[in-house]
Image: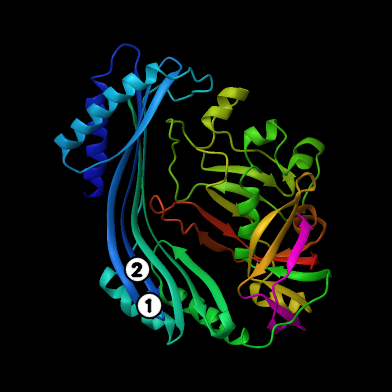
Amino acid sequence: MASDESRQGFFELIAGTSETLQGEEVLLASFAGERSDFVRFGGGRVRQAGAVARADVGLDLIAGERHAEATLTLTGEPSADAGQVAAAVERLRHVRTALAPDPFLAYATGPSESFEQRGAVLPAFAEIPALVERIAGGADLVGMWAQGRIERGFASSFGGRGWHEVDSFQVDASFHGRAGAAVKWMHAGGDWDEGALAAKADAARAELGLLERSAVEIAAGRYRAFLAPAALEEIFGLLAWEGFGLKSHRTRQTPFLKMVADGRELSPAVTLSDRRVQTPAFTAEGFRRPDEIVLIDRGRYAGCLASARSAKEYGVEVNADDESPQELEMAGGELDERDALPELGTGLLLSNLWYTNFSDRGECRITGMSRYACFWVEDGVRKAPLAPMRFDESLYHLLGSGLIALTSRRETLADADTYGGRSLRRALLPGALIDGLTIAL
């Protein structure tokens, strides 16, 4: 279905279903749809190509403090969809009576309206195979290209109506060389720019040649380091689990506890926020999401994410759909990325990290491994790839006393997850120059 048909069909479906509710029943409904092109490639050639069109509706039938939920896949045929939704509501009505009351159930109870549409110019599907071959340049390029429109909706029996649609693309890829060498990279955004993609691919391909040199093993100790945006994203991905949510703050589970409770600070250069660009202005319960939630302001704790359930439990306003950032942004600094390695001098260039975990949660101390194109740098020049090594460092040093500078340019890093549909999550992060990263082994 076209976007207008999807939106109208969903709203009409829920409006009709709402007329069948009994007594004090309330209906909340969500819509998740997409029309996406997918291309998988290996060896610099397209190996699989196809398109996905899907539309799912989530139902939450409420009476008092009891509620029951279901998710259905829509057919696009109005009478068939109305029939299956009506049958699902009847099933939920019976299930609900057997469920215990939910004391933290919360939802918006008035009419509302929200509409956002972010279109973009994307390449034609038929052009993608040739584009893949051009950016591969004869090298072994492996990965996935995904593009198209993602749709999200909300409707309630109170007259709440919300719709959000966005066009975007993402290329999640890696170049592979001899002896397992690989350079992982991503390019994502809205309007298509082949020149920007080609520049990203050329830089990654150049690093692949450097990885064929003999690896350098470094001794345990502390080294100057430059963390690329993708390396920072891995660290923030760990922190996002319980770092920024109201529930974890009030139960003292957040790794930022010393910032929240004791006033400990990061560098004044660090400002983090969850800023809406691609994600909807409404939550699954119909509450309005603000355009931006500042989490850390110039090194100081500023706020947290409050989902509907946590907001009900602790008596605050809802500001988030869930309690991990959906679009984490970090303010950039003044370092030109072309000057990053000269400013580093001698030390570590960390392009990617993995296996991150907490080694001391109370101190916000994180451990992890280097991955993909990480290099030993001397006098501002990549000399050799790094053998796999483990770091162990407190965030209060990484982004606090040890932070020298942040790059002015930031990189958009899209969530490449497609398991339940294309994700709208993303991060916009700079690179970070650190005066001393502890290498444990």
Residue in front for this viewpoint, 200 or 24: 24
* Residue that numbered label 1 is attached to: 132
Q: If you read the primary sequence from the N terminus, does the residue marked by circle 1 or circle 2 appear first? A: 2
Helix, strand or loop at label 1? It is: helix
Residue at the (58%, 83%) spot, across then down: 179
Determine the main secondary structure of the stretch shown in magenta: strand
The reply, left or right, for residue 371 in relation to residue 128 is right
Name the amino acid type tagged 2: Val
Residue in front for this viewpoint, 282 or 36: 36
Percent x, y of residue 154: 36, 35
Name the amino acid type tagged 1: Val
Residue at the (77%, 84%) spot, across then down: 379
The reply, left or right, for residue 245 in relation to residue 89 is right
Q: Looking at the image, is 119 positioned above or below residue 290?
A: below
Percent x, y of residue 378: 77, 83
Q: Looking at the image, is 266 positioned above or below residue 414?
A: above
Q: Which segment is the magenta one?
A: 373-394
- Label 2: how many residues lie within 10 Å, few (<14), some (14-19) or many (20+)? many
Residue at the (44%, 37%) spot, across then down: 282
Q: Looking at the image, is 12 positioned above or below residue 110?
A: below
Residue 13 on the magenta segment: no
CB within 8 Å, label 1 to label 2: yes
Numbered badge on residue 40: none
